[in-house]
């Protein structure tokens, strides 16, 4: 008389008891069984509603877990991508710094070479200037000696006799 899932409200309400001489009042028993059946019916409905709610919540929980896993995967992927980008940027920065260092060294060597060449040119120009000054001094001495010789010759000559035939 008891089904797999327990007693139904209809079975409670329809149950009949044997009558004995000093038993309970059948009307009171019927009223009580009706109240119990009604309460039991409400509990069965509530249980059914709660089972559906549990199913819905379980489905929602599964969906939230799926979303959580997706978010974890996305976060992991984003973090890995950020780490990869950071590592790549660091490698590129190091490469740029190294290249700049090489170019700087090359430029410095070129500047030093050019500075050496300019210094050499300055020394050559100073030597040429000294040579020119020496040549000008020599020329001035020779011209001065020539002027003195001409003046000496001229002092020995008489200006009045200069244009007359001798």
Image (cartoon, helix red, strand yellow):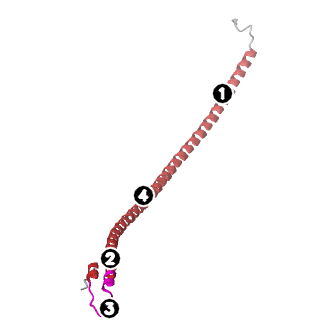
Q: Which residues are magenta?
A: 15-31
Q: Nearer the viewer, residue 140 or 98?
A: 98
Task: Find residue 30 and report its horizontal and vertical position in percent.
Answer: 30, 82
On residue 85, which mark appears?
4
Give yes or no for contact between labels 2 and 1 (Cβ–Cβ under 8 Å).
no
Q: Which mark's residue is nearer the viewer, 4 or 1?
A: 4
- Which of marks 2 and 3 precedes in the sequence? 3
- Mark 2 = which residue? 38
150 w.r.t. 99: above or below: above
Numbered circle sitting on residue 139: 1
Q: Residue at x 53, y 48 (%)?
A: 108
Q: Is residue 100 above or below residue 13?
A: above
C-beta proximity under 8 Å, tags 4 and 2: no
Please tell me which residue is depicted at 33% across the width and 68% down the height of the picture: 56
Q: Which mark is residue 23?
A: 3
Is 144 left, or right, of 45 in this rendering? right
Left or right of 92 in this view: 130: right
3D distance between C-alphas at marks 3 and 2? 24 Å
């Amino acid at each position: 008389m008891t089904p797999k899932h327990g007693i139904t409200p209809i079975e409670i309400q329809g149950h009949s008891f044997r009558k004995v001489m000093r038993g309970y009042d059948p009307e009171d028993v019927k009223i009580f069984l009706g109240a119990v059946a009604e309460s039991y019916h409400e509990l069965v409905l509530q249980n059914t509603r709660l089972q559906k709610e549990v199913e819905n919540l379980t489905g929602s929980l599964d969906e939230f877990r799926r979303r959580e896993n997706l978010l974890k995967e996305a976060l992991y992927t984003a973090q890995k991508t950020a780490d990869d980008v950071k590592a790549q940027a660091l490698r590129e920065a190091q490469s740029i710094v190294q290249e700049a260092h090489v170019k700087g060294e090359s430029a410095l060597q070129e500047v030093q070479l050019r500075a050496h060449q300019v210094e050499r040119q300055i020394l050559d120009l100073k030597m040429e200037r000294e040579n020119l000054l020496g040549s000008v001094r020599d020329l001035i001495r020779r011209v001065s000696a020539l002027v003195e010789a001409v003046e000496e010759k001229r002092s020995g000559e008489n200006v009045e006799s200069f244009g007359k035939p001798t």
